[in-house]
Image (cartoon, helix red, strand yellow):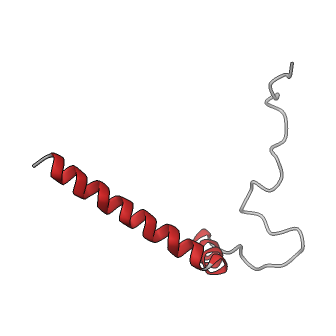
Amino acid sequence: MSNPPSPTQEPEQGLDTTTAPPDGSTEPKPSYTKLAMRNMVRKGGKSLTHFFLTVSGLLALLVGLAYLTR
């Protein structure tokens, strides 16, 4: 059985984004958008396949709902 953490416990390291990185560089962290774009470029065709599957699924859902509610 584990005890709940006490309120005096220090927060985990790495959660604070306002401090400078420990390696001493003053470069800001890349934004989430930049990281997502870099990841999408790295994965290449897999991202495009998922994108087109999502678009076709949403179109099918909308056409199906339009057909059922006419």
Picture residue at 44% right of the left edge, 65% below the top: 53
**Is the residue 15 above or below the residue 1 in the image?**
below
Picture residue at 64% right of the left edge, 76% below the top: 43
Residue situated in front as seen by the camera: 33 or 60: 60
**Is the residue 6 above or below the residue 56 in the image?**
above
Q: In which quadrant is the N terminus drawn?
A: top right
Picture residue at 60% right of the left edge, 71% below the top: 36
Task: Using residue 17 as the reference point, say whether residue 54 is left or right of it.
Answer: left
Task: Using residue 28 as the reference point, say whether residue 63 is left or right of it.
Answer: left
Q: What is the quadrant of residue 30 in the picture?
A: bottom right
Task: Using residue 58 as the reference point, say whether residue 48 is left or right of it.
Answer: right
**Is the residue 42 above or below the residue 69 in the image?**
below
**Is the residue 21 above or below the residue 13 in the image?**
below
Q: Position of residue 41 (x, y in %)?
A: 62, 81
Number of numbered tags placed on the structure image: 0
Residue situated in front as seen by the camera: 30 or 41: 41
The residue most toward the left is 70
Q: Position of residue 50 (x, y in %)?
A: 51, 67
Picture residue at 30% right of the left edge, 59% below the top: 60
Q: Position of residue 44 (x, y in %)?
A: 61, 80
Q: Position of residue 10 (x, y in %)?
A: 84, 41
